Image (cartoon, helix red, strand yellow):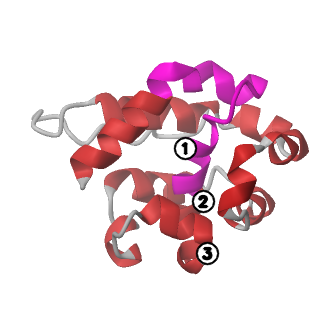
Amino acid sequence: MQTLLRLIATLALALGAHTAHARGDGDIWIMVVGPMCLSQYPSHASTEMGKIFLRGAAIDDFVERPFARCFRQHNWASRNLCEDVMGLQKEQMRDLQSVHERHRDEIRRLKPAFDYFNSYINQDPASPSWPFACPEEAR
């Protein structure tokens, strides 16, 4: 499961999530915002988006992952952003531009979360320094 999560996230972030999330290029930003929202607001686990991001994992296990604890610690994403993202239906995933437009400024401010998640998923779990440390504070 960890390998699948790392592969999906690595591919998404390798395609440019670190800059695309702030500009609205494509919809890669949701690959970080979705897990962030699920981590911060576990009540969204039963939504269609929650099930997509959980990928069969139990919410209790998901929220205990190091990245999920970090997302909760900083509470980076607002309830409004998370309600919009986690309230999407699968067919709405084809065009996320309207959600991005409504939350553009907030998504831009999530850069520390994107940087953290990118570092986290690219670190080898076999490394003695894994998991990647949660930043002390948001920049």
**Left-right relation of 82 to 67:** right
| The stretch drawn in magenta includes residue 72 | no
Secondary structure of residue under mark 3 = loop
> Disc 1 versus disc 3: distance between alpha carbons?
17 Å
Q: CA distance from mark 1 to mark 2?
A: 9 Å
- Which secondary structure, mark 2? helix
Q: Position of residue 126 (x, y in %)?
A: 9, 37
Question: Magenta region: which residues?
Answer: 13-36
Q: Is residue 106 left or right of residue 117?
A: right
Residue 133 seen? no
Which residue in the protein does label 2 denote? 37
Determine the main secondary structure of the stretch shown in magenta: helix
Question: Quarter-wise, where is residue 123 in the image?
Answer: top left
Residue 65: give x, y in percent of width and height.
32, 59
Q: Residues within 10 Å of mark 2 (few under 14, many from 20)?
A: many
Residue 68, how many percent across, how many down? 43, 57
Residue 76 in view, yes or no = yes
Amino acid carrying mark 2 in the image: Cys
Q: What quarter of the picture does the C terminus occupy?
A: top right
